[in-house]
Amino acid sequence: MKTIIEPFRIKSVEPIRMTTPGEREQILREAHFNLFLVKAEDVVIDLLTDSGTGAMSSEQWAGVMRGDESYAGARSFYRFEETLKRITGFEHILPTHQGRASERILFSLLGGEGRVVPNNAHFDTTRANIEHSGARAVNLPIPEASEPANRHPFKGNMDVGALKVLIDEVGRERIPCVMLTITNNSGGGQPVSLGNIRAVSEVCRANGLPFFLDACRFAENAWFIKQREDGQKDRPVAEIVREMFDLADGATISAKKDGIVNMGGVLLVRDPDLLRRAGELLILTEGYTTYGGLSGRDLEAMARGFEEVLREDYLRYRIRSTAYLGDRLLEAGIQIIEPPGGHAVYVDARAFCPHIPPEQFPGQSVVCGLYREGGIRSCEIGSVMFGGGSEAPPMELVRLAIPRRVYTQSHIDYVAEVFIALKEKAGALRGMRIVEQPPALRHFTAKFEEI
Ligand SMILES: *Cc1c(COP(=O)(O)O)cnc(C)c1O
């Protein structure tokens, strides 16, 4: 059969409130043209993020009822720990309330003035946590990553040559760890090949540097490896996942992505000394080491989510449904980052409205245009999110992130239609200026004006 269907039935539904163009115009103005400031019920299709927005399965909800809420040593913790040990092979597993809590703990221990942390592409919270510690966050993507139309199968790869140059330049003693983000979220949701993970791991080993994965989307990354990398197509995804983790010394995970839960995170380490110090910080700011700022029911839901995400019929549907949206936009002449990513389609906002220069935030103009046109909420990943920091972003993107197991094909068809309608009016989109912003992570709260 040609059609890849959603491999689930819907048991519970949540109504969508429709809005009129007039209502949306007023809502947009009241939110100062920042979609983070719009109420969710005023959104028709919410593609702001795939983080924590997935639909849990009936098994996960059943786990919620079985959650053991004991303060220490809860049954739910042991179930969570056993699942993550089995999937990743890591000996030491700490639960945290979300990915950035893992990052904050890790970089409180590894960061600091004068230090440098390389990554293929730092996610915004990772960069912010590193910079908050006083260290410098450096992106080392392969050159193909910044060419939207280049269909390199592993555009998330790190430039291994550039990593070696950086190590020589700054000295290995100033690099507390090397990170790889799989899949790379800020660079288009693009996968990293097993070959590249291996190569980065080898450079780290040769230089005595700890190697960490930002493994939020490890299952999606493994599916791409199975589909695209030589010699991988007959391996079970679980085996590829295990090999990816085997190559690393530690990992941070936001379970709100491939854990398919609404809240949760994980910190995985091999070094017992690092575990001890991380556990101390966890207790200080998150909670005791067997709950890490979560409820027992959250740990149950995570344990089941991490198993469900490895089902290959799920991953086939997941990656195909994202590609379906990407292909429809491409057919309509809308430049996206090719090939489409795993969790999101990233539209090239500079190509969409070439009359708006980067300093007038073309991505933000498109985000506002999509909301006006059809009530779609998307996310700017460009000069709003990454400008004003230590490195200018290489691309101006609008991310359409697809929540897991939430929208059907007709919702996605609607999104494509809205985007195509907006394309007809792209010449009339106006640039933006920021009128108010906080010192860090400004995209969440900045206020804008149309120029
Ligand atoms: C979401 C995300 C994080 C941060 O996780 P939160 O759960 O949002 O704190 C870190 N890295 C990447 C690649 C992410 O996608």
Image: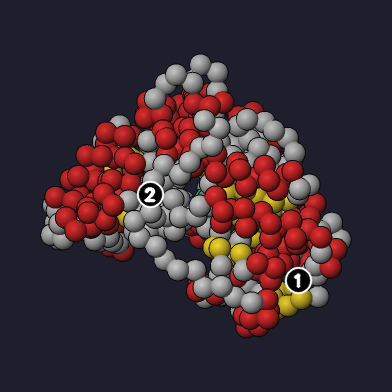
Which disc number belongs to residue 432? 1
Q: Residue furthest top?
A: 231
**What amino acid is labelled 2 in the image?**
Arg
**Whole-percent x, y for residue 218 in the image:** 44, 39
Q: Secondary structure at mark 1?
A: strand
**Whole-percent x, y for residue 87 in the image:** 31, 34
Q: Is residue 399 above or below residue 342?
A: below
**What amino acid is labelled 1 in the image?**
Met
At label 2, counting other C-alpha atoms closer than 10 Å, the crowd grade (few under 14, some 14-19, many 20 or more) is few
Is mark 2 in CB contact (under 8 Å) with mark 1? Answer: no
Q: Quadrant for residue 242, please give it.
A: top left
Can see residue 281? no
Q: Quadrant for residue 55, please give it.
A: bottom left
User: Which of 262 and 115 lies nearest the eye of the viewer?
Assistant: 262
Left or right: 51 with respect to 185?
left
- Sooner in the amino-acid sequence: mark 2 or mark 1: 2
- The answer for how far apart the CA atoms under marks 2 and 1 are is 42 Å
Can see residue 15? yes
Which disc number belongs to residue 69? none
Which disc number belongs to residue 9? 2
